[in-house]
Amino acid sequence: MQQVEKRIVVNLDLCIGCHSCSAACHYGHHQQTNLVAGEVTDIAEVPANCRHCANPACMEGCPTGALFKDEFGYVRRSKLLCVGCRSCALACPFGVIGYEFTRHISPKCDLCIDRVVEGKIPRCVSACTSGALQFLELLQESISQTLVGGRFVAHSKVRRM
């Protein structure tokens, strides 16, 4: 039997750059935006969501163990253990963990797990006015093929020093 997981998928053709997804994330997480924007060669800014990797480099790079995989397989952050060192942001090959932190915590998408466990969709997806963000079930084999493409199409506005 194939394992099926839900992920946020961005359709670049539909994104209008309105940032309603960022606003929903910001207000839904008590004034901390966990969503970073990617820039497509000076054409548009699009949301860059965490891919919740099978072997997350951000978890390996975290010196305090603040990042962990929950029972659903999503990479989450313990706010009590995070010291805002940004090691996870440096380790993430997709550039989806931001450098600008609030309350000494590095911003990282938690997939709105509080909503997902209730059967709802993440805040950014529900706020997307153009339908560019979708919360879809993907087969485990297709996740790498579907999501890695964003790495080559867009680059994060976050620059490594």
Image (cartoon, rainbow, N blue to C red):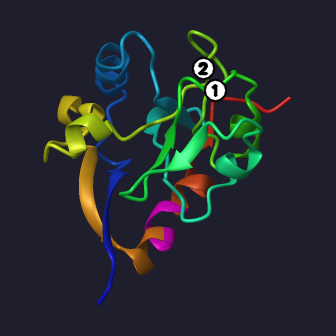
Seen from the viewer's position, the closer of residues 88 and 81 is 81
- Camera-near label (1 vs 2) is 1
145 lies left or right of 5: right
Looking at the image, can residue 93 be seen? no
**Could you tell me which residue is drawn at 47 percent across and 27 percent down?**
34
Residue 91 on image: x %, y %: 74, 45
* Labelled disc at residue 82: 1
Over which residues does the magenta segment extend?
144-148
Looking at the image, can residue 136 be seen? yes
146 over 80 or under it: above or below = below
Q: CA distance from mark 1 to mark 2?
A: 6 Å
5 lies left or right of 40: left
**Could you tell me which residue is drawn at 29 percent across and 19 percent down?**
28
Which residue is the site of mark 2?
A: 105
Q: Which corner quadrant of the image does residue 26 belong to?
A: top left
Asked which secondary structure carries label 2, the reply is loop
57 over 55 or under it: above or below = above
Q: Earlier in the sequence, mark 1 or mark 2?
A: 1
The amino acid type of the residue labelled 2 equals Ile
Circles 1 and 2 in contact, beta carbons < 8 Å: yes
Residue 156 on image: x %, y %: 62, 37
50 over 152 or under it: above or below = above
